[in-house]
Structure formats: C-alpha cells, structure tokens
Image (spheres, rainbow, N blue to C red):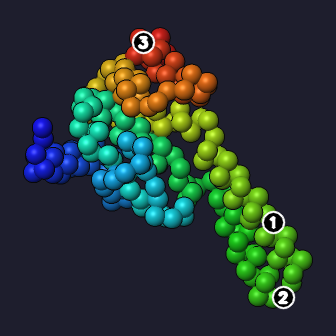
Amino acid sequence: MTSRSDFKSFEQEETERLRDLLPASLRPLISIVPNFGGDALLLSRRKAPWQPQGTVAIDFRRWQGIPQPQRDLLFLREVGWFDNRNWLQPGFYQSLALIGGITTLAELSLQHPFSALLAGGITALSVRQIWQNLNRESAHFDADEFALRRAQYRGYTRQEAAQHLVDGLEQTLKLDPTDILTALRLQRLKAIALNLHP
C-alpha cells in the first residue's frame, strides 16, 4: 500500500511532469490541482467563461493506477477540450457580442430603450451562438486531434498516441453503448491507430 508521503511525492512529481507536457503558451493559463471527491477522473474549468485562465483537476488516487502513456494522452485531450472552449478566441460572434454589449450600454446611457433592446438582443443571440459552437460535436474531435498532435512533440507516433488515447478512454470512461459521439470518436481513433485514417 502506498504511504501518504509516497503518494504526495507522486502527486508533486506528476504535476510537474504534466506541466512539462503543456504547450508553452498554455502553461501560464492552466493550473493542475487535485480533485477531491466526485466521479470525474479529470475535470477542467475556467475561473470565469470570459477568462483564459483555469484549472485541470485530477483524481490522483485513480490517476496513479493508469499507465503513463494513457495518462499523457488523457491529460492532453482534456487540455485540448479546455483550449477549444475559449470564449475569447477571435471570431465573428465574439466580435458581434462585444460590439452588441458596448452598444447596449451606450444606448442605455443615452436612454434609448428600443435601440438598447435591439442591441441587447443581438448580444444575446451572439452569446448563444458562441455557446453552441463551444459545445458542438466537432469540438470533441478537435480535442482528440490536439492530444494526438501534441503527443507527437513528446516522442509518440500518431498511431501510438491514438492507441493510448483509446486505451485510456476505454479504461476510465463508463462507456454507454448508446453514446454515439463517444463511439464515433473511438472508431476514428482506432482507425488512426491502425493507420487507416489520415
């Protein structure tokens, strides 16, 4: 049985090792912290939706029992999911929401209720579209792809990385046979692992 001091040592060393896996641009933005309680092995959250900084919380007790290559790919996949869900990524709807918000405030200060209502509606629609884009199905595939690309910088081949991610997902997820999205992701990753997919 692992002693408390050994576990703490693993937690600290693993945190440093995972930080080293992060792209340099994300290191100042992501904190790796222990996740106490809950069913999630990995959980990423932003300080606020409009802030780029956030945390990836890890259940290190369960994490310790997973082979390192699988840990690498699961972590990179979570980072990819976190990075893809950035409200502040430049885009048409982000710009529209910003302009709409500024216009709403300006029209309210000028006491033009109809114009403020119109600008507020545009802002709300833009925010709704951003939310839908962040939660679209392709965002999951983008996060998988981020993990595969980043793993290649750490010495994995694309095929090896895909297989490790498949193994990690199958080991850590309670796979629901009716979850079509996860089934499609696993099918795609298995095809990459067998070099059947570009």
Measure the C-alpha gap from mark 3 to mark 2.
63 Å
Measure the C-alpha gap from mark 3 to mark 1.
48 Å
Direction front: furthest residue: 1
Seen from the viewer's position, the closer of residues 47 and 115 is 47
Residue 61 position within the rendered picture, expressed as x and y whole percent measured from the top left = 26, 43
Neighbour tally class for label 3: few under 14, some 14-19, many 20 plus, Cα within 10 Å: few
Residue labelled with disc 3: 195
| Callout 1 touching callout 2 (CB < 8 Å) | no
In this rendering, position of residue 104 left or right of residue 72: right
Q: Tag 1, which secondary structure?
A: helix
Q: Is residue 149 visible?
A: no
Q: Amino acid at mark 1?
A: Gly
Direction bottom: furthest residue: 110
Q: Which mark is residue 111?
A: 2
Q: Amino acid at mark 3?
A: Asn
Measure the C-alpha gap from mark 1 to mark 2.
17 Å
Indicate the quadrant where residue 106 lies: bottom right
Q: Amino acid at mark 2?
A: Gln
Q: Which mark is residue 41?
A: none
